Image (spheres, helix red, strand yellow):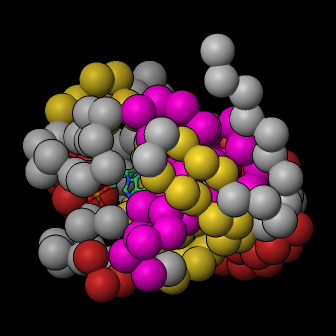
Amino acid sequence: MSEINENKNEKLVIGEDVFVPFLTEDVIQNRIKEMAAQISQDYKGKIPIFIGVLNGAFIFLSDLIKNVSIDCEIDFFKLSSYGDSKISSGNVRLLKELNCEVNGRDIIIVEDIVDSGLSIKYIEEIFVKHSPSSMKVCSLLMKPESLKYDVKIDYIGFNIPSKFVIGYGLDYAQKFRNLRTIFSLSE
Ligand code: IMP
Ligand code: MG
């Protein structure tokens, strides 16, 4: 069994891949506080539903709502697109539907990362049919150079280069979501 020794300043060697620290816990948490403050201000007097896209967004959603100061609800939605590879398959499958009623509600879709934009586009098309009162997208990370679909991301934590990243909810073959630091693949 392999053991991950997560050290803030140390690289992570996974098979033949080398990952280097990219966004530390402090940097991530400080940015999330700013995002939560902005959302709390924008939705004052409303009760938005944060809809997390599983699995990647669960840690971000959890830290985000802990910093939100208005009443809110949460739900989750599950898609599968990457399989176990580092490159998007371009296929999206719905694996878990919502439990909540979206009709007439203010919804905020929460993603870990927007890459090509396919997942968000697919999700927006589904949700729009349920007539929410408003729909916004919040993503911790965004790779602007990889964007292929016409999607608008309303709240972005960090714009990052088109490199594969892991940690803080983001996986590589389902592993490494538990890292507190986000690491990027070094080439
Ligand atoms: P998109 O549909 O191409 O925008 O890809 C979005 C989804 O792919 C995200 O929700 C992630 O789950 C996954 N993804 C994209 N880039 C990365 C990455 O660098 N590391 C891990 N997962 C990623
Ligand atoms: Mg995801």
| Picture residue at 44% right of the left edge, 23% below the top | 99
| Picture residue at 83% right of the left edge, 65% below the top | 9
Along the line of sight, which residue is nearer the eye, 164 or 25? 164
Residue 165 belongs to the span the image colors magenta: yes
| Picture residue at 72% right of the left edge, 44% below the top | 179
Along the line of sight, which residue is nearer the eye, 42 or 77? 77
Residue 55 belongs to the span the image colors magenta: no
Split into 4 quadrants, where in the image is the C terminus?
Answer: bottom left
Along the line of sight, which residue is nearer the eye, 41 or 184? 184
In percent of width and height, residue 47 lies at 66, 52
Split into 4 quadrants, where in the image is the N terminus?
Answer: top right
The picture quadrant for ligand 1 comes to bottom left
In percent of width and height, residue 55 lies at 49, 34
Q: Quadrant of residue 121?
A: bottom left
In percent of width and height, residue 60 lies at 66, 51
| Picture residue at 60% right of the left edge, 48% below the top | 13
**Region of the chain picked out in magenta, as a range:** 161-187
From what the image shows, is residue 14 above or below residue 124?
above
In percent of width and height, residue 10 lies at 78, 60
Q: In this view, does 180 lie to the left or right of 96?
A: right
- Disc tally is 0
